[in-house]
Amino acid sequence: MRWPGLIDPHVHMREPGGTHKEDWSSGTAAALAGGFTQVLAMPNTDPPVVDNRSLTMVHGLAEKKAHCDFAQYLGATPDNAKTACKLAHKSAGLKLYLDQTYGPLRLDSMALWQSHLQAWPADFPVVAHAEGRTMAAVILLAALSQRPLHLAHVATREEILLVKAAKERGINITCEVTPHHLFLTIDDLADGWREVRPRLGTGSDVAALWENLPVIDCFATDHAPHTAAEKVGENTPPGFPGLETALPLLLTAVHEGRMFLEDVSNRLGKNVRQIFRIPTQQDTWIEVDLEAKRTLSARHMHSKAMWTPFEGWPVRGAVQTVTLRGKKVYQDGRVLSPPGFGKGIR
Protein backbone atom coordinates (compact mmCIF):
# COMPACT_ATOMS: atom_id res chain seq x y z
CA MET A 1 0.00 0.00 0.00
CA ARG A 2 1.21 3.52 -0.83
CA TRP A 3 0.46 6.52 1.37
CA PRO A 4 1.66 10.13 1.38
CA GLY A 5 4.48 10.68 3.87
CA LEU A 6 3.34 10.86 7.48
CA ILE A 7 3.68 13.94 9.72
CA ASP A 8 4.49 13.91 13.43
CA PRO A 9 3.57 17.25 15.03
CA HIS A 10 5.20 16.48 18.38
CA VAL A 11 8.79 15.24 18.67
CA HIS A 12 11.80 16.01 20.86
CA MET A 13 15.07 15.88 18.95
CA ARG A 14 17.12 16.64 22.11
CA GLU A 15 19.54 18.87 20.22
CA PRO A 16 21.00 21.11 21.55
CA GLY A 17 21.80 20.00 25.08
CA GLY A 18 20.88 16.31 25.10
CA THR A 19 22.58 14.71 22.15
CA HIS A 20 23.49 11.58 24.13
CA LYS A 21 19.72 10.87 24.06
CA GLU A 22 19.03 11.88 20.43
CA ASP A 23 20.11 14.42 17.83
CA TRP A 24 18.74 15.72 14.56
CA SER A 25 20.45 12.95 12.59
CA SER A 26 19.39 9.96 14.69
CA GLY A 27 15.92 11.35 15.42
CA THR A 28 15.04 12.02 11.80
CA ALA A 29 16.48 8.64 10.80
CA ALA A 30 14.04 7.13 13.29
CA ALA A 31 11.30 9.25 11.73
CA LEU A 32 11.94 7.85 8.26
CA ALA A 33 12.00 4.31 9.65
CA GLY A 34 8.56 5.01 11.09
CA GLY A 35 7.21 6.41 7.81
CA PHE A 36 7.37 10.08 8.87
CA THR A 37 8.70 12.49 6.24
CA GLN A 38 7.98 15.65 8.27
CA VAL A 39 8.45 16.29 11.99
CA LEU A 40 7.75 19.30 14.21
CA ALA A 41 10.27 19.61 17.05
CA MET A 42 9.52 20.92 20.53
CA PRO A 43 11.46 23.86 22.06
CA ASN A 44 12.39 22.51 25.52
CA THR A 45 16.02 21.93 24.63
CA ASP A 46 19.05 23.25 26.48
CA PRO A 47 19.07 26.16 25.85
CA PRO A 48 15.36 26.37 24.99
CA VAL A 49 14.23 27.80 21.66
CA VAL A 50 12.59 31.08 22.64
CA ASP A 51 13.99 33.82 20.38
CA ASN A 52 15.49 34.49 16.96
CA ARG A 53 19.01 33.58 18.06
CA SER A 54 18.09 30.15 19.43
CA LEU A 55 15.67 29.45 16.55
CA THR A 56 18.37 30.28 13.99
CA MET A 57 20.86 28.07 15.83
CA VAL A 58 18.53 25.06 15.82
CA HIS A 59 17.62 25.60 12.18
CA GLY A 60 21.33 25.50 11.38
CA LEU A 61 21.76 22.20 13.23
CA ALA A 62 18.76 20.66 11.51
CA GLU A 63 19.83 21.85 8.07
CA LYS A 64 23.15 20.04 8.48
CA LYS A 65 21.82 16.82 10.03
CA ALA A 66 18.16 16.13 9.31
CA HIS A 67 17.24 13.18 7.08
CA CYS A 68 13.59 14.28 6.71
CA ASP A 69 11.80 17.62 6.56
CA PHE A 70 11.28 19.59 9.76
CA ALA A 71 10.04 22.65 11.58
CA GLN A 72 10.91 23.97 15.02
CA TYR A 73 8.51 25.31 17.65
CA LEU A 74 9.13 28.43 19.71
CA GLY A 75 8.62 28.20 23.46
CA ALA A 76 6.54 30.79 25.27
CA THR A 77 8.22 32.43 28.26
CA PRO A 78 7.05 35.02 30.80
CA ASP A 79 8.68 37.81 28.83
CA ASN A 80 8.74 36.95 25.10
CA ALA A 81 5.12 37.43 23.96
CA LYS A 82 5.92 40.64 22.04
CA THR A 83 9.02 39.23 20.33
CA ALA A 84 8.04 35.61 19.72
CA CYS A 85 5.02 36.58 17.63
CA LYS A 86 7.33 38.23 15.08
CA LEU A 87 8.95 34.83 14.43
CA ALA A 88 5.72 32.92 13.82
CA HIS A 89 6.38 32.56 10.08
CA LYS A 90 9.72 30.85 10.82
CA SER A 91 8.39 28.37 13.37
CA ALA A 92 6.20 25.29 13.57
CA GLY A 93 4.06 27.16 16.10
CA LEU A 94 4.10 28.43 19.67
CA LYS A 95 4.28 25.94 22.54
CA LEU A 96 2.72 26.82 25.89
CA TYR A 97 3.87 24.69 28.82
CA LEU A 98 1.15 25.07 31.44
CA ASP A 99 1.65 21.99 33.61
CA GLN A 100 4.55 20.08 35.11
CA THR A 101 7.53 20.38 32.83
CA TYR A 102 11.29 20.57 33.01
CA GLY A 103 13.34 23.68 32.35
CA PRO A 104 12.41 27.37 32.30
CA LEU A 105 9.34 27.24 30.03
CA ARG A 106 6.45 26.69 32.46
CA LEU A 107 3.94 29.54 32.56
CA ASP A 108 2.08 29.70 35.87
CA SER A 109 0.04 32.86 35.32
CA MET A 110 -3.12 32.89 33.21
CA ALA A 111 -2.34 36.52 32.40
CA LEU A 112 0.81 35.28 30.65
CA TRP A 113 -1.16 32.66 28.74
CA GLN A 114 -3.56 35.32 27.56
CA SER A 115 -0.78 37.68 26.48
CA HIS A 116 0.64 34.98 24.21
CA LEU A 117 -2.77 33.93 22.86
CA GLN A 118 -3.55 37.51 21.94
CA ALA A 119 -0.14 38.35 20.46
CA TRP A 120 0.50 35.22 18.38
CA PRO A 121 -0.85 35.48 14.79
CA ALA A 122 -4.14 33.60 14.46
CA ASP A 123 -3.09 31.82 11.26
CA PHE A 124 -0.17 30.06 12.96
CA PRO A 125 -0.74 27.30 15.52
CA VAL A 126 -0.56 27.51 19.28
CA VAL A 127 -0.05 24.19 21.07
CA ALA A 128 -0.66 23.82 24.80
CA HIS A 129 0.69 21.24 27.23
CA ALA A 130 -2.27 21.40 29.58
CA GLU A 131 -3.73 18.74 31.85
CA GLY A 132 -6.99 18.50 33.79
CA ARG A 133 -8.16 21.83 35.19
CA THR A 134 -5.40 23.65 33.37
CA MET A 135 -6.79 22.32 30.10
CA ALA A 136 -10.22 23.67 30.94
CA ALA A 137 -8.73 27.06 31.76
CA VAL A 138 -6.71 27.42 28.56
CA ILE A 139 -9.68 26.33 26.42
CA LEU A 140 -11.69 29.14 28.01
CA LEU A 141 -8.93 31.70 27.43
CA ALA A 142 -8.52 30.61 23.80
CA ALA A 143 -12.27 30.99 23.29
CA LEU A 144 -12.23 34.46 24.87
CA SER A 145 -9.29 35.38 22.64
CA GLN A 146 -11.16 34.02 19.60
CA ARG A 147 -8.21 32.05 18.34
CA PRO A 148 -7.61 28.37 17.45
CA LEU A 149 -5.82 26.18 19.98
CA HIS A 150 -4.28 22.73 19.67
CA LEU A 151 -4.07 20.54 22.77
CA ALA A 152 -1.08 18.22 23.07
CA HIS A 153 -1.25 14.61 24.27
CA VAL A 154 -4.77 14.38 25.70
CA ALA A 155 -4.53 11.42 28.06
CA THR A 156 -7.47 10.96 30.42
CA ARG A 157 -11.20 10.34 30.36
CA GLU A 158 -12.03 13.74 31.84
CA GLU A 159 -9.81 15.49 29.28
CA ILE A 160 -11.23 13.81 26.17
CA LEU A 161 -14.78 14.43 27.40
CA LEU A 162 -13.88 18.08 28.03
CA VAL A 163 -12.52 18.42 24.50
CA LYS A 164 -15.66 16.76 23.13
CA ALA A 165 -17.92 19.14 25.05
CA ALA A 166 -15.92 22.19 23.91
CA LYS A 167 -16.11 21.11 20.27
CA GLU A 168 -19.85 20.50 20.52
CA ARG A 169 -20.20 24.12 21.65
CA GLY A 170 -18.27 25.41 18.66
CA ILE A 171 -14.99 26.28 20.39
CA ASN A 172 -12.16 26.20 17.87
CA ILE A 173 -9.86 23.57 19.36
CA THR A 174 -8.10 20.46 18.06
CA CYS A 175 -6.28 17.75 19.94
CA GLU A 176 -3.78 14.92 19.61
CA VAL A 177 -3.35 11.61 21.41
CA THR A 178 -0.17 9.55 21.64
CA PRO A 179 0.05 5.82 20.91
CA HIS A 180 1.38 5.18 24.42
CA HIS A 181 -1.74 6.71 25.95
CA LEU A 182 -3.90 4.64 23.58
CA PHE A 183 -2.18 1.32 24.23
CA LEU A 184 -0.64 1.44 27.73
CA THR A 185 -1.96 1.92 31.25
CA ILE A 186 -0.13 2.81 34.45
CA ASP A 187 -0.07 -0.90 35.35
CA ASP A 188 1.71 -2.04 32.19
CA LEU A 189 5.22 -0.77 33.00
CA ALA A 190 7.36 -0.83 36.11
CA ASP A 191 9.18 1.89 38.03
CA GLY A 192 11.05 4.48 35.96
CA TRP A 193 10.14 2.84 32.67
CA ARG A 194 6.59 4.18 33.01
CA GLU A 195 7.60 7.78 33.72
CA VAL A 196 6.07 10.02 31.07
CA ARG A 197 4.15 13.31 30.97
CA PRO A 198 1.22 13.28 30.94
CA ARG A 199 1.33 10.14 33.06
CA LEU A 200 -0.13 6.91 31.77
CA GLY A 201 -3.77 6.56 32.70
CA THR A 202 -6.02 3.81 33.95
CA GLY A 203 -7.93 1.26 31.93
CA SER A 204 -10.92 3.59 32.13
CA ASP A 205 -8.86 6.43 30.61
CA VAL A 206 -7.67 4.26 27.73
CA ALA A 207 -11.20 3.01 27.07
CA ALA A 208 -12.50 6.59 26.95
CA LEU A 209 -9.91 7.58 24.34
CA TRP A 210 -10.97 4.69 22.11
CA GLU A 211 -14.66 5.38 22.67
CA ASN A 212 -14.14 9.00 21.58
CA LEU A 213 -11.89 8.38 18.59
CA PRO A 214 -13.90 10.85 16.42
CA VAL A 215 -12.92 13.63 18.86
CA ILE A 216 -9.20 13.00 18.27
CA ASP A 217 -7.86 15.10 15.38
CA CYS A 218 -4.41 13.58 15.08
CA PHE A 219 -1.97 11.09 16.53
CA ALA A 220 1.40 12.36 17.70
CA THR A 221 4.23 10.30 19.13
CA ASP A 222 5.61 12.83 21.63
CA HIS A 223 8.90 11.07 20.81
CA ALA A 224 10.89 11.94 23.95
CA PRO A 225 13.93 9.64 24.10
CA HIS A 226 16.15 8.99 27.08
CA THR A 227 18.83 6.35 27.30
CA ALA A 228 18.00 3.02 28.92
CA ALA A 229 20.50 3.78 31.69
CA GLU A 230 18.61 6.98 32.55
CA LYS A 231 15.34 5.10 32.96
CA VAL A 232 16.70 2.89 35.76
CA GLY A 233 16.61 3.92 39.42
CA GLU A 234 14.94 6.82 41.21
CA ASN A 235 13.92 10.19 39.72
CA THR A 236 14.00 8.91 36.17
CA PRO A 237 13.25 11.47 33.45
CA PRO A 238 9.82 11.25 31.83
CA GLY A 239 9.41 10.32 28.20
CA PHE A 240 9.30 7.48 25.68
CA PRO A 241 10.77 7.03 22.20
CA GLY A 242 7.90 6.58 19.76
CA LEU A 243 8.66 7.41 16.13
CA GLU A 244 9.39 3.83 15.09
CA THR A 245 6.51 2.12 16.91
CA ALA A 246 3.53 4.41 16.22
CA LEU A 247 2.50 3.19 12.77
CA PRO A 248 2.73 -0.58 13.42
CA LEU A 249 0.77 -0.18 16.68
CA LEU A 250 -1.99 1.73 14.89
CA LEU A 251 -2.04 -0.68 11.94
CA THR A 252 -2.36 -3.55 14.39
CA ALA A 253 -5.44 -1.82 15.79
CA VAL A 254 -6.79 -1.70 12.23
CA HIS A 255 -6.26 -5.45 11.86
CA GLU A 256 -8.08 -5.95 15.15
CA GLY A 257 -11.06 -3.94 13.92
CA ARG A 258 -10.60 -1.11 16.41
CA MET A 259 -10.25 1.56 13.72
CA PHE A 260 -10.07 1.93 9.95
CA LEU A 261 -7.11 2.67 7.68
CA GLU A 262 -8.61 6.08 6.99
CA ASP A 263 -8.55 6.83 10.72
CA VAL A 264 -4.81 6.29 10.71
CA SER A 265 -3.96 8.05 7.45
CA ASN A 266 -6.03 11.15 8.27
CA ARG A 267 -4.65 11.50 11.81
CA LEU A 268 -1.05 11.07 10.69
CA GLY A 269 -1.41 13.09 7.50
CA LYS A 270 -4.28 15.20 6.18
CA ASN A 271 -5.54 16.46 9.55
CA VAL A 272 -2.05 17.37 10.76
CA ARG A 273 -1.36 19.22 7.54
CA GLN A 274 -4.55 21.25 7.92
CA ILE A 275 -4.10 22.09 11.61
CA PHE A 276 -0.48 23.15 11.26
CA ARG A 277 -0.76 24.63 7.76
CA ILE A 278 1.97 22.45 6.36
CA PRO A 279 2.52 22.51 2.59
CA THR A 280 2.15 19.30 0.62
CA GLN A 281 5.39 17.45 -0.08
CA GLN A 282 5.82 16.84 -3.77
CA ASP A 283 6.81 13.37 -5.05
CA THR A 284 6.75 11.99 -1.51
CA TRP A 285 5.21 8.71 -0.35
CA ILE A 286 5.71 5.64 1.80
CA GLU A 287 5.11 2.02 0.90
CA VAL A 288 3.73 -0.14 3.71
CA ASP A 289 3.27 -3.90 3.90
CA LEU A 290 -0.03 -4.12 5.79
CA GLU A 291 0.23 -7.89 6.27
CA ALA A 292 3.78 -8.05 7.67
CA LYS A 293 3.95 -9.77 11.05
CA ARG A 294 6.79 -8.91 13.40
CA THR A 295 7.75 -8.28 17.00
CA LEU A 296 8.78 -4.80 18.12
CA SER A 297 12.33 -4.66 19.41
CA ALA A 298 14.69 -1.78 20.07
CA ARG A 299 17.51 -3.79 18.49
CA HIS A 300 16.16 -2.85 15.07
CA MET A 301 15.55 0.84 15.76
CA HIS A 302 17.48 3.95 14.77
CA SER A 303 16.85 6.12 17.83
CA LYS A 304 19.72 6.53 20.28
CA ALA A 305 17.34 5.55 23.09
CA MET A 306 17.80 1.85 22.26
CA TRP A 307 14.68 0.81 24.20
CA THR A 308 10.93 0.91 23.73
CA PRO A 309 8.01 0.50 26.14
CA PHE A 310 6.54 -1.85 23.53
CA GLU A 311 9.45 -4.32 23.54
CA GLY A 312 8.21 -7.75 22.49
CA TRP A 313 4.80 -6.60 21.27
CA PRO A 314 3.54 -8.51 18.20
CA VAL A 315 2.38 -6.11 15.49
CA ARG A 316 1.08 -6.05 11.95
CA GLY A 317 2.41 -3.70 9.28
CA ALA A 318 5.88 -2.51 8.31
CA VAL A 319 7.31 0.42 6.38
CA GLN A 320 9.14 -0.95 3.35
CA THR A 321 10.30 2.17 1.52
CA VAL A 322 10.10 5.95 1.90
CA THR A 323 10.48 8.32 -1.03
CA LEU A 324 11.05 12.01 -0.24
CA ARG A 325 10.93 14.58 -3.07
CA GLY A 326 11.47 11.82 -5.62
CA LYS A 327 14.48 10.26 -3.88
CA LYS A 328 14.29 6.91 -2.08
CA VAL A 329 15.47 7.73 1.44
CA TYR A 330 14.60 4.53 3.32
CA GLN A 331 14.37 0.89 2.31
CA ASP A 332 14.00 -2.31 4.32
CA GLY A 333 15.51 -0.99 7.55
CA ARG A 334 18.22 1.21 5.99
CA VAL A 335 18.22 5.01 5.90
CA LEU A 336 19.55 6.03 2.49
CA SER A 337 19.39 9.82 2.62
CA PRO A 338 22.49 11.74 3.76
CA PRO A 339 22.35 14.03 6.81
CA GLY A 340 21.14 17.41 5.66
CA PHE A 341 18.77 16.07 3.01
CA GLY A 342 15.80 17.26 5.06
CA LYS A 343 14.46 20.75 4.41
CA GLY A 344 12.77 23.29 6.66
CA ILE A 345 8.99 23.34 6.25
CA ARG A 346 8.58 27.05 7.03
Image (cartoon, rainbow, N blue to C red):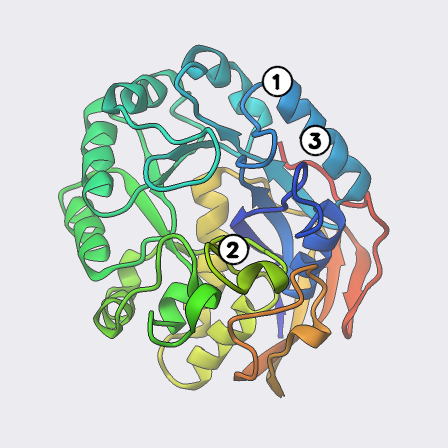
Determine whether, in the image, residue 8 is placed left or right of residue 259: right
Q: Residues within 10 Å of mark 1 (few under 14, many from 20)?
A: some
- SS at mark 1 in the image: helix
Q: Are marks 2 and 1 in contact (CB under 8 Å)?
A: no
Question: Relative to 115, does residue 279 appear above or below in the rendering?
Answer: below
Q: Residues within 10 Å of mark 2 (few under 14, many from 20)?
A: many
Amino acid under label 3? His
Amino acid under label 2? Gly
Residue that mark 3 sits on: 59
Determine whether, in the image, residue 117 is placed left or right of residue 104: left
Q: Which mark is residue 269?
A: 2
Question: Relative to 257, does residue 56 appear above or below in the rendering?
Answer: above
- Quarter assignment of residue 155: bottom left
Mark 3 or 2: in front is 3
Residue 45 % position (x, y): 58, 36
From mark 3 to mark 2, how far is it between C-alphas?
23 Å
Residue that mark 1 sits on: 52
